[in-house]
Amino acid sequence: MKKVTIAILLTAVLVLGSFGMAGAVTDGYPDGDGHPYVGLMVAQDADGTPMWRCSGTLLSPTLFLTAGHCTEAPAAHVEIWFDADVDAGIPGNGYPFTGQVGGTPYTHPNYNPNAFYLYDLGVVVLDSPMVMAEYGALPAQDQLDDLKTKRGHKDTTFTAVGYGLQKSFPDAASWKTQAFRIRMVAEPQLIQINGGIVGDFSLLLSNNANTGGTCFGDSGGPNFIGSSNVVGGVTSFGMNGTCAGTGGVYRVDRADDLDWLYGNFGAHLP
């Protein structure tokens, strides 16, 4: 997991923090067939060597939405699986070399790996269509701003979906027992929006035993608004090494994100 130290100027106040790329679901439950359009991806370099895995959302038969740090260089190709339990098929499912479908990764043009949390958005254009009965959907521009004026955040929930670590432990042996490649679901609550350390580009969601949340291992998974199929944001960063307290989600409802998605990949979107 990558750790970076950041400095963000918010409302004339310098806020220092240590963010780490995050992902997967903690204290959740197996998704089963609940979100079949959420997949597990493995990024490969130009030689076909697997490098890292992430989660993401199929928005159409040919466009897969994920985090920017999942598609950044040296990623040259991506393989994707949509099984609810990818582990169950090993070794017959081709993991981590050959998924159900492959594709080409693209990263937000303003993405900077040294400040990944600012434009942490990427997509994969699939080599062949994955036809499903339903797909994830993009939000309307600035749709999440309405949550800022809602009285209290405790009742504002999201549906986080992802693969990978279900918990984070201090020793490698324990980590291995909680790192199954199973699609999991949790219902984290909104903690912070439009202010604090997240500015207007991210959200902080709860990460505890009551609501569940996200953890290290597989970034890019969707955080659906409520129980809908609308992707409010993609799992982006964690605040500590034990996946406790809060998790960071990169918002997808900002103009620069939607302009990039529709402007460059509109032919792949409904």
Image (cartoon, grey):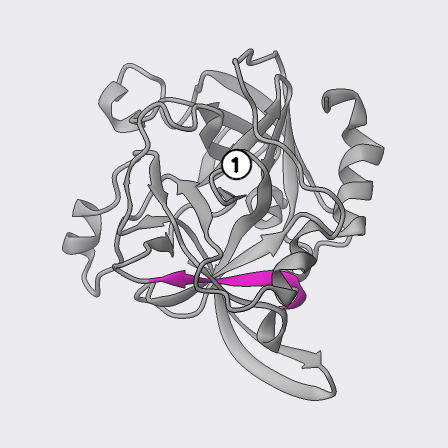
Q: Position of residue 267 (x, y in %)?
A: 79, 21
28 left or right, relative to 58 = left
Residue lying farthest to the bottom in this orientation: 13
What kind of element bears circle 1?
A: loop
Q: Position of residue 151 (x, y in %)?
A: 55, 68
Q: Amino acid at mark 1?
A: Ser
Q: Nearer the viewer, residue 66 or 245?
A: 245
- Indicate the quadrant where residue 114 lies: bottom right
Q: Position of residue 44 (x, y in %)?
A: 52, 33
**Residue numbers of the magenta segment:** 199-207
- Does residue 17 appear in the picture of this structure? yes
- Position above or below: 101 against 104: above
215 left or right, relative to 58 = left
Q: Main secondary structure of the magenta part?
A: strand
- Position above or below: 130 against 166: above
The local crowd at label 1, few if under 14, some if 14 to 19, many if 20 or more residues have their Cα within 10 Å, is: few
- Position above or below: 135 against 43: above
Q: Is residue 128 magenta?
A: no
